[in-house]
Image (cartoon, grey):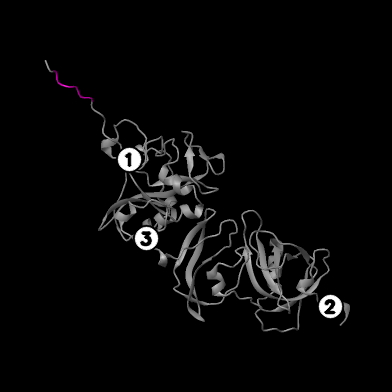
């Protein structure tokens, strides 16, 4: 074999030179849109020995690479850069990755290999918790109990999600709950609970709960408490709750997450529902997309664009408890509110337009959990003379 026909193995690749020539097969590819960098095409390539390497392509070369490389087809690649891998999650065990550059050349290969080069992980390893969570794995199984397409928010953008269970055909009892999202997100990995394993409890049991946990209740919605505003404002950049700090026509808000004053905000649902079952009643707060599924519209569609109903206020307790977590938590959560456990310590005040007419003339006091009480009446003791 002549020198220009020599192929280097993936295990021989090192970052000290660019004149490499490899014969590889494309086995995985996906578009990545991280919030901190430009769009890129990520791939996993394998050589004849079965070794695999991550390969990246910047945005300007994506179309050319997609035309040159086909899934499952062998190709010869020359002139590419080798660098160290970065990021929290890595698709291969190799500490280096290949980078496609403008000088990279693709040519056809006469080598045919029917192997899929998959390194399958067993269900036992996953269920046993022995898998390195920073490595992307390959698993083969039967998809069962496929759910419908859901819309979730990732970095304040809508993403489609399909949840299903994966069954190992060798072991009928080995079933994994999985989720597919239309875009990878390294900074905010989504953890899916198996809701089939979450127990159903009565509302009366909710009042006895002393710690945060996942539960399910079967109830009917008796009413929506209109004494409270049905929305709150969130920062358009991070999606977290903001506090109004000015009374201008287009008010200014303070975002604690961005640590800056912002004017670009949007409304998000915050519905106070009164729910009941055979054991009792409770008040639930529905936030974000959970409330959106109930209403059938986005909060921005129902909002009239006015800021008049928003008073200068601090974070209300029901919202701050949830928004203090992550954006994925706040947009997919139902929260139980105990009206007797909250205190009036300068929290969010109910807007006047959201109070009952009989309460409009009452003294202005602040409360996040209790309705306005009637005015106090001073009484005199009768004279004993």
> In the shown orientation, is residue 20 left or right of residue 252?
right
- Front residue of 236/205: it is 205
- Residue 265: x percent and y percent? 50, 45
- Quadrant of the image for the C terminus? top left
Q: Is residue 379 magenta?
A: yes
Mark 2 sits on what residue?
A: 6
In which quadrant of the rendered view does residue 66 lie?
A: bottom right
How would you classify the magenta stretch by its main secondary structure?
Answer: loop
Kindly check if marks 2 and 3 are in contact, taking CB atoms under 8 A apart as contact: no
Identify the magenta region: 378-383
Q: Disc 1 marks which residue?
A: 370
Q: Which mark is residue 213?
A: none
Of the residues under marks 2 and 3, which one precedes in the sequence?
A: 2
**CB contact under 8 Å: marks 1 and 3:** no
Whether residue 74 sits left or right of residue 244 in the image: it is right
Which percent across, then down, holds residue 55? 71, 67
Q: Which secondary structure lies at badge 3?
A: loop
Q: Label 3, on which residue?
A: 216
Could you tell which of marks 1 and 3 lies nearer the N-terminus? Answer: 3
Badge 2 marks a residue whose secondary structure is loop
Name the front one of labels 1 and 2.
1
Q: Residue at x 69, y 79 (%)?
A: 73
Q: Residues within 10 Å of mark 1 (few under 14, many from 20)?
A: some
Tell me how far mark 2 sits from mark 3, CA to CA: 62 Å
Q: Secondary structure at mark 1?
A: loop
Please tell me whether residue 380 belongs to the stretch shown in magenta. Answer: yes
Cα distance in 3D space between marks 1 and 2: 78 Å
Q: Is residue 75 above or below residue 151?
A: below
Q: Nearer the viewer, mark 1 or mark 3?
A: 3
Regarding residue 169, the answer to whether it shows in the image is no
């Amino acid at each position: 074999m002549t020198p220009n026909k020599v192929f280097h193995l993936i295990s021989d690749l090192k970052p000290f030179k660019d004149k490499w020539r490899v014969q590889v097969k494309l086995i995985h590819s996906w578009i990545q849109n991280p919030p901190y960098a430009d769009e890129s095409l990520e791939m996993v390539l394998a050589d004849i020995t079965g070794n695999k390497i991550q390969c990246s392509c910047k945005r300007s070369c994506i179309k050319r690479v997609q035309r040159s490389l086909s899934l499952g087809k062998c190709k010869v690649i020359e002139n590419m850069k080798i660098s160290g891998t970065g990021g929290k999650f890595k698709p291969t065990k190799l500490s280096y990755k290949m980078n496609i550059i403008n000088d990279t050349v693709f040519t056809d290969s006469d080598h045919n290999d029917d192997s899929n080069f998959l390194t399958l992980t067993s269900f036992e390893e996953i269920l046993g918790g022995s898998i390195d969570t920073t490595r992307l794995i390959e698993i083969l199984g039967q998809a069962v109990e496929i759910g419908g397409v859901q819309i979730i928010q990732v970095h304040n953008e809508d993403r489609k999600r399909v949840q299903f269970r994966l069954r190992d055909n060798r072991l009928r009892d080995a079933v994994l709950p999985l989720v597919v999202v239309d875009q990878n997100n390294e900074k905010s990995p989504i953890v899916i609970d198996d809701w089939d394993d979450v127990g159903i409890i009565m509302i009366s049991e909710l009042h006895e709960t002393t710690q945060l946990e996942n539960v399910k209740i079967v109830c009917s919605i008796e009413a929506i408490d209109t004494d409270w505003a049905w929305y709150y404002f969130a920062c358009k950049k991070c999606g977290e709750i903001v506090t109004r700090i000015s009374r201008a026509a287009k008010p200014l808000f303070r975002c604690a997450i961005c640590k800056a004053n912002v004017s670009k905000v949007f409304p998000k649902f915050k519905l106070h529902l009164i729910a009941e079952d055979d054991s009792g009643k409770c008040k639930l707060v529905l936030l974000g997309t959970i409330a959106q599924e109930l209403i059938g519209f986005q909060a921005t569609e129902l909002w009239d664009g006015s800021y008049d109903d928003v008073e200068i206020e601090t974070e209300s307790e029901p919202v701050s408890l949830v928004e203090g977590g992550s954006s994925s938590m706040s947009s997919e959560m139902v929260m139980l509110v105990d009206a007797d456990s909250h205190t009036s310590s300068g929290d969010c005040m109910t807007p006047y337009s959201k109070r009952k007419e009989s309460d409009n003339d009452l003294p202005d006091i602040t409360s996040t959990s209790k309705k306005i009480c009637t005015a106090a009446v001073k009484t005199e003791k009768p004279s004993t003379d």
